């Protein structure tokens, strides 16, 4: 169990919406079965967490998450909160998050504020945006519901995109997660700057895939959101990935 320590980053004050994404790694077969079962069983408990707004439970894919083959050891929870104090208190004190931490061999939570968001998620616009400094490090969430007829084409594209992002020396953290296997996909990535992120997004396989999405209508619903990083707690692979940014 990791000690609860926040690594403070620039722009951390104010009573504006906070978005958290928490990752949990499970080691034993028993704990992995528990985490899988909680994809359904945790829903009632999540909805009763004090102060929680929009929330989602995720499984992950193998090979950094960007494949249709599941990774049964890694799960995630996304949530919105009215302010940072509520987020920190509820994540630390609520029974359901405590159970996840207790069962997990490692956990890591990132605190963020949305800079920009477009599109919808389950028919909602979950993120309240604020004006932030776009010169610093940032996180990006993309989310889409795939049309069944486009599944094969989408998953043929993903390995090429995964290889490119994996070779990019500027990406600080990346993972593919999903609500419903194969059909509802989410990517979460952290970049040192908007320029670095744009350089990846607008070139090569990724750019061609986005063009195909627009021309062929692969998605029933999609969302893109960019976030200012506020803080993190816990570790992933033994340390905070944000230390790579040299701003913690």
Image (cartoon, helix red, strand yellow):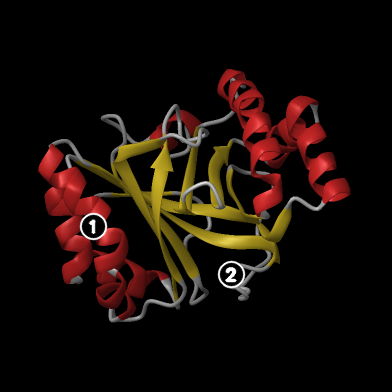
Assess disc 2: are there few (<14), some (14-19) or many (≥20) residues with their C-alpha within 10 Å of its C-alpha: many
- What residue is rendered at 70% in x and 37% in y? 153
**The furthest residue to the front:** 149
Q: Can residue 3 be seen in this view?
A: no
- What residue is rendered at 65% in x and 23% in y? 160
For residue 90, above or below residue 180: below
Locate residue 248: give its quadrant: top left
Q: What element carries label 1?
A: helix
For the residues labelled 2 and 1, the Cα–Cα distance comes to 28 Å
The residue at which mark 1 appears reads as 37
The residue at which mark 2 appears reads as 127
Mark linked to residue 2: none
Residue 138 spot, x, y in % from top left: 59, 46
* Badge 2 vs badge 1, beta-carbon distance below 8 Å: no
Q: Earlier in the sequence, mark 2 or mark 1?
A: 1
Assess disc 1: are there few (<14), some (14-19) or many (≥20) residues with their C-alpha within 10 Å of its C-alpha: few
Residue 143 in the figure: left or right of residue 213: left
Residue 222 in the figure: left or right of residue 107: right
């Amino acid at each position: 169990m990791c000690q609860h320590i926040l690594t403070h980053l620039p722009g951390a004050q104010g009573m504006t919406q906070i978005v958290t994404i928490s990752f949990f790694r499970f080691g034993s077969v028993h704990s992995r079965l528990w985490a899988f079962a909680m994809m359904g069983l945790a829903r009632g408990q999540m909805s009763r967490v004090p102060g929680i707004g929009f929330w989602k439970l995720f499984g992950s894919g193998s090979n950094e998450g960007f494949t249709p083959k599941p990774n049964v050891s890694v799960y995630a929870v996304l949530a919105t909160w009215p302010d940072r104090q509520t987020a920190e208190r509820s994540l630390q004190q609520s029974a359901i998050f405590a159970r996840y931490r207790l069962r997990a061999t490692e956990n890591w939570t990132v605190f963020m504020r949305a800079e920009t968001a477009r599109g919808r998620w389950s028919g909602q616009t979950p993120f309240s945006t604020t004006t932030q400094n776009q010169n610093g490090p940032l996180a990006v969430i993309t989310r889409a519901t795939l049309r069944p007829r486009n599944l094969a084409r989408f998953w043929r594209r993903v390995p090429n995109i995964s290889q490119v992002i994996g070779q990019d020396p500027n990406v600080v953290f990346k993972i593919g997660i999903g609500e419903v296997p194969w059909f509802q996909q989410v990517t979460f990535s952290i970049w040192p700057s908007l320029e670095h992120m744009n350089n990846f997004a607008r070139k090569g396989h990724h750019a061609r895939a986005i063009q195909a999405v627009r021309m062929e209508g692969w998605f029933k619903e999609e969302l893109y959101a960019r976030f200012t990083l506020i803080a993190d707690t816990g570790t992933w692979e033994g340390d905070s990935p944000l230390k790579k940014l040299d701003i913690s």
